[in-house]
Image: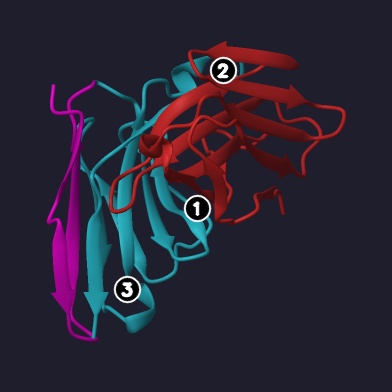
Chain colours: A cyan, B red
Amino acid sequence: NAGVTQTPKFQVLKTGQSMTLQCAQDMNHNSMYWYRQDPGMGLRLIYYSASEGTTDKGEVPNGYNVSRLNKREFSLRLESAAPSQTSVYFCASRARGESNLRSSYNEQFFGPGTRLTVL
Amino acid sequence: QKEVEQNSGPLSVPEGAIASLNCTYSDRGSQSFFWYRQYSGKSPELIMFIYSNGDKEDGRFTAQLNKASQYVSLLIRDSQPSDSATYLCAVLFTGGGNKLTFGTGTQLKVEL
Protein backbone atom coordinates (compact mmCIF):
# COMPACT_ATOMS: atom_id res chain seq x y z
CA ASN A 1 0.00 0.00 0.00
CA ALA A 2 1.30 3.43 -0.94
CA GLY A 3 -1.04 5.14 1.56
CA VAL A 4 -1.70 8.76 0.63
CA THR A 5 0.24 10.13 -2.33
CA GLN A 6 0.51 13.72 -3.53
CA THR A 7 1.84 15.32 -6.69
CA PRO A 8 3.81 17.39 -7.28
CA LYS A 9 6.25 17.52 -4.35
CA PHE A 10 7.44 21.02 -5.22
CA GLN A 11 5.99 23.78 -7.40
CA VAL A 12 6.84 27.39 -8.14
CA LEU A 13 4.14 29.57 -9.69
CA LYS A 14 3.90 33.16 -10.77
CA THR A 15 1.08 35.32 -9.43
CA GLY A 16 -2.08 34.68 -11.43
CA GLN A 17 -1.13 31.23 -12.69
CA SER A 18 -3.36 28.26 -12.00
CA MET A 19 -2.55 24.73 -10.97
CA THR A 20 -4.07 21.58 -9.53
CA LEU A 21 -2.61 19.60 -6.66
CA GLN A 22 -3.37 15.91 -6.90
CA CYS A 23 -4.03 13.52 -4.02
CA ALA A 24 -4.84 9.82 -4.05
CA GLN A 25 -5.26 7.16 -1.37
CA ASP A 26 -5.35 3.40 -1.72
CA MET A 27 -6.76 2.57 1.74
CA ASN A 28 -10.42 2.63 0.69
CA HIS A 29 -11.02 5.58 3.00
CA ASN A 30 -14.26 7.56 2.84
CA SER A 31 -13.09 10.98 4.03
CA MET A 32 -10.37 13.14 2.51
CA TYR A 33 -8.96 16.52 3.50
CA TRP A 34 -6.78 19.34 2.24
CA TYR A 35 -4.72 21.39 4.71
CA ARG A 36 -2.20 24.13 4.43
CA GLN A 37 0.62 24.58 6.94
CA ASP A 38 2.33 27.90 7.50
CA PRO A 39 5.00 28.74 10.09
CA GLY A 40 3.39 29.49 13.43
CA MET A 41 -0.10 28.74 12.11
CA GLY A 42 -0.31 24.99 12.42
CA LEU A 43 -2.48 22.94 10.07
CA ARG A 44 -5.52 24.76 8.72
CA LEU A 45 -8.30 22.95 6.90
CA ILE A 46 -9.04 24.24 3.41
CA TYR A 47 -11.69 21.79 2.18
CA TYR A 48 -12.78 18.29 3.01
CA SER A 49 -14.87 15.53 1.54
CA ALA A 50 -16.76 13.29 3.94
CA SER A 51 -17.55 10.81 1.19
CA GLU A 52 -17.45 10.41 -2.56
CA GLY A 53 -19.60 13.05 -4.18
CA THR A 54 -19.57 15.55 -1.31
CA THR A 55 -17.27 18.45 -0.49
CA ASP A 56 -17.39 21.13 2.20
CA LYS A 57 -15.47 24.25 3.08
CA GLY A 58 -13.02 24.27 5.94
CA GLU A 59 -11.45 27.15 7.80
CA VAL A 60 -9.61 28.83 4.89
CA PRO A 61 -11.36 27.99 1.56
CA ASN A 62 -11.01 31.33 -0.25
CA GLY A 63 -8.96 31.09 -3.44
CA TYR A 64 -9.32 27.31 -3.71
CA ASN A 65 -11.62 24.76 -5.31
CA VAL A 66 -11.74 21.01 -4.91
CA SER A 67 -12.97 17.97 -6.77
CA ARG A 68 -13.64 14.56 -5.30
CA LEU A 69 -13.11 12.69 -8.55
CA ASN A 70 -13.85 9.26 -7.10
CA LYS A 71 -13.32 7.51 -3.80
CA ARG A 72 -9.54 7.45 -4.29
CA GLU A 73 -8.81 10.95 -5.56
CA PHE A 74 -9.30 14.44 -4.18
CA SER A 75 -7.76 17.38 -6.02
CA LEU A 76 -7.17 20.98 -4.97
CA ARG A 77 -7.16 23.75 -7.56
CA LEU A 78 -5.75 27.26 -7.35
CA GLU A 79 -7.43 29.27 -10.10
CA SER A 80 -5.32 32.41 -9.76
CA ALA A 81 -2.38 31.93 -7.44
CA ALA A 82 -1.39 34.68 -5.01
CA PRO A 83 1.78 35.05 -2.89
CA SER A 84 -0.40 34.51 0.21
CA GLN A 85 -0.94 30.95 -0.99
CA THR A 86 2.74 30.13 -0.58
CA SER A 87 2.60 27.24 1.85
CA VAL A 88 3.01 23.52 2.37
CA TYR A 89 -0.13 21.64 1.39
CA PHE A 90 -1.06 18.31 2.93
CA CYS A 91 -3.72 15.90 1.84
CA ALA A 92 -5.11 13.45 4.40
CA SER A 93 -7.63 10.64 4.49
CA ARG A 94 -9.68 8.93 7.17
CA ALA A 95 -11.32 5.54 7.28
CA ARG A 96 -14.84 6.27 8.37
CA GLY A 97 -17.35 8.64 6.84
CA GLU A 98 -19.18 9.30 10.08
CA SER A 99 -17.68 10.44 13.34
CA ASN A 100 -17.23 7.91 16.09
CA LEU A 101 -15.81 9.78 19.03
CA ARG A 102 -14.55 6.65 20.77
CA SER A 103 -12.73 5.23 17.82
CA SER A 104 -9.19 5.70 16.69
CA TYR A 105 -10.67 5.34 13.21
CA ASN A 106 -10.88 9.12 13.45
CA GLU A 107 -7.14 9.03 12.78
CA GLN A 108 -6.17 10.94 9.67
CA PHE A 109 -3.33 9.67 7.48
CA PHE A 110 -1.28 12.33 5.76
CA GLY A 111 0.43 12.47 2.40
CA PRO A 112 4.04 13.70 2.02
CA GLY A 113 3.03 17.27 1.20
CA THR A 114 3.49 19.75 -1.65
CA ARG A 115 5.70 22.79 -1.16
CA LEU A 116 4.21 25.62 -3.20
CA THR A 117 5.87 28.98 -3.77
CA VAL A 118 3.99 31.77 -5.49
CA LEU A 119 6.19 34.62 -6.71
CA GLN B 1 -14.60 29.51 17.44
CA LYS B 2 -13.30 26.25 18.81
CA GLU B 3 -9.60 26.45 19.56
CA VAL B 4 -6.66 24.28 20.47
CA GLU B 5 -3.72 25.97 22.19
CA GLN B 6 -0.14 24.80 22.47
CA ASN B 7 3.08 26.50 23.56
CA SER B 8 5.22 26.76 20.42
CA GLY B 9 8.48 26.15 22.31
CA PRO B 10 11.12 25.14 21.65
CA LEU B 11 11.09 22.86 24.65
CA SER B 12 14.60 21.61 25.33
CA VAL B 13 15.23 18.54 27.48
CA PRO B 14 18.38 16.49 28.04
CA GLU B 15 18.58 12.96 26.71
CA GLY B 16 17.01 10.49 29.12
CA ALA B 17 14.74 13.08 30.76
CA ILE B 18 10.94 13.25 30.68
CA ALA B 19 9.48 15.68 28.16
CA SER B 20 6.06 17.10 29.02
CA LEU B 21 3.95 18.66 26.29
CA ASN B 22 0.64 20.36 27.00
CA CYS B 23 -2.45 21.27 25.04
CA THR B 24 -5.62 23.10 26.07
CA TYR B 25 -8.89 23.19 24.18
CA SER B 26 -11.91 25.44 24.26
CA ASP B 27 -14.88 23.09 23.95
CA ARG B 28 -15.76 21.33 27.19
CA GLY B 29 -17.76 18.73 25.31
CA SER B 30 -14.86 17.48 23.21
CA GLN B 31 -14.12 13.81 23.61
CA SER B 32 -11.44 12.62 21.18
CA PHE B 33 -7.85 13.79 21.27
CA PHE B 34 -4.83 13.02 19.13
CA TRP B 35 -1.11 13.62 19.32
CA TYR B 36 0.76 13.76 16.03
CA ARG B 37 4.53 13.95 15.61
CA GLN B 38 5.99 15.87 12.69
CA TYR B 39 9.66 15.78 11.79
CA SER B 40 11.06 18.77 9.95
CA GLY B 41 10.08 18.64 6.30
CA LYS B 42 7.86 15.60 6.80
CA SER B 43 4.15 14.96 7.23
CA PRO B 44 2.40 14.45 10.59
CA GLU B 45 2.06 10.90 11.92
CA LEU B 46 -0.24 9.76 14.73
CA ILE B 47 1.48 8.62 17.91
CA MET B 48 -1.36 8.64 20.46
CA PHE B 49 -5.15 8.70 20.59
CA ILE B 50 -7.06 9.18 23.85
CA TYR B 51 -10.76 9.24 24.49
CA SER B 52 -11.34 8.71 28.19
CA ASN B 53 -10.23 10.69 31.21
CA GLY B 54 -6.99 9.55 32.80
CA ASP B 55 -3.81 8.14 31.30
CA LYS B 56 -3.06 6.05 28.26
CA GLU B 57 0.37 4.51 27.88
CA ASP B 58 2.12 3.21 24.77
CA GLY B 59 5.78 2.39 25.24
CA ARG B 60 7.65 5.54 26.24
CA PHE B 61 4.62 7.72 25.52
CA THR B 62 1.81 8.56 27.95
CA ALA B 63 -1.17 10.72 27.09
CA GLN B 64 -3.07 12.29 29.99
CA LEU B 65 -6.55 13.71 29.63
CA ASN B 66 -8.30 16.00 32.11
CA LYS B 67 -11.69 16.98 30.74
CA ALA B 68 -12.67 19.08 33.76
CA SER B 69 -9.64 21.32 33.20
CA GLN B 70 -9.80 20.95 29.42
CA TYR B 71 -6.24 19.91 28.83
CA VAL B 72 -4.42 16.96 27.38
CA SER B 73 -0.75 16.22 27.90
CA LEU B 74 1.86 14.05 26.28
CA LEU B 75 4.73 12.69 28.36
CA ILE B 76 7.77 11.19 26.70
CA ARG B 77 9.92 9.15 29.05
CA ASP B 78 13.62 8.49 28.47
CA SER B 79 13.70 11.15 25.74
CA GLN B 80 15.96 10.38 22.79
CA PRO B 81 17.45 12.70 20.17
CA SER B 82 15.18 10.95 17.66
CA ASP B 83 12.19 12.39 19.57
CA SER B 84 13.22 15.88 18.43
CA ALA B 85 10.25 17.01 16.35
CA THR B 86 7.14 19.16 16.46
CA TYR B 87 4.21 17.64 18.33
CA LEU B 88 0.74 18.58 17.19
CA CYS B 89 -2.32 18.26 19.39
CA ALA B 90 -5.60 17.69 17.56
CA VAL B 91 -9.17 17.65 18.88
CA LEU B 92 -12.35 16.23 17.43
CA PHE B 93 -14.89 18.75 18.64
CA THR B 94 -18.47 17.72 19.27
CA GLY B 95 -20.59 18.84 16.36
CA GLY B 96 -17.47 19.20 14.27
CA GLY B 97 -18.42 16.42 11.92
CA ASN B 98 -15.41 14.71 10.44
CA LYS B 99 -13.00 17.54 11.12
CA LEU B 100 -10.00 17.69 13.43
CA THR B 101 -8.83 21.02 14.80
CA PHE B 102 -5.06 21.22 15.23
CA GLY B 103 -2.95 23.28 17.59
CA THR B 104 0.07 25.11 16.23
CA GLY B 105 2.43 22.51 17.65
CA THR B 106 5.25 22.42 20.20
CA GLN B 107 8.82 22.00 19.00
CA LEU B 108 10.77 19.54 21.15
CA LYS B 109 14.56 19.40 21.16
CA VAL B 110 16.29 16.54 22.95
CA GLU B 111 19.89 17.43 23.62
CA LEU B 112 22.81 15.06 24.05
What secondary structure is found at the residue carrying circle 3?
loop
Q: Above or below — where is A8 with respect to A24?
A: below
Bin the neighbour count of mark 3 within 10 Å (Cα to Cα): few under 14, some 14-19, many 20 and up: some
Extent of the magenta region: A1-27
Q: Amino acid at mark 1?
A: Gly
B87 with respect to A26 (left or right): right
Task: Tell me the subunit letter for badge 1.
Answer: A
Residue A70 at what x, y percent from top left? 20, 35
Residue B19, image quadrant: top right
**Which residue shows up at 65% across the image and 53% down it?**
B7
In the image, which is nearer the foreground, mark 3 or mark 2? 3
Residue B104, image quadrant: bottom right
Is circle 1 on the same chain as circle 3?
yes
Task: Tell me the subunit letter for badge 2.
Answer: A
B39 with respect to A6 (left or right): right
The mark nearer the N terminus, 3 or 2, is 3
Question: Farthest residue in the right direction?
Answer: B68
The mark nearer the N terminus, 2 or 1, is 1
Residue hosting label 3: A86
Q: Amino acid at mark 3?
A: Thr
Residue hosting label 1: A58
Question: Visible in this render: residue B48?
Answer: yes
Bin the neighbour count of mark 2 within 10 Å (Cα to Cα): few under 14, some 14-19, many 20 and up: some
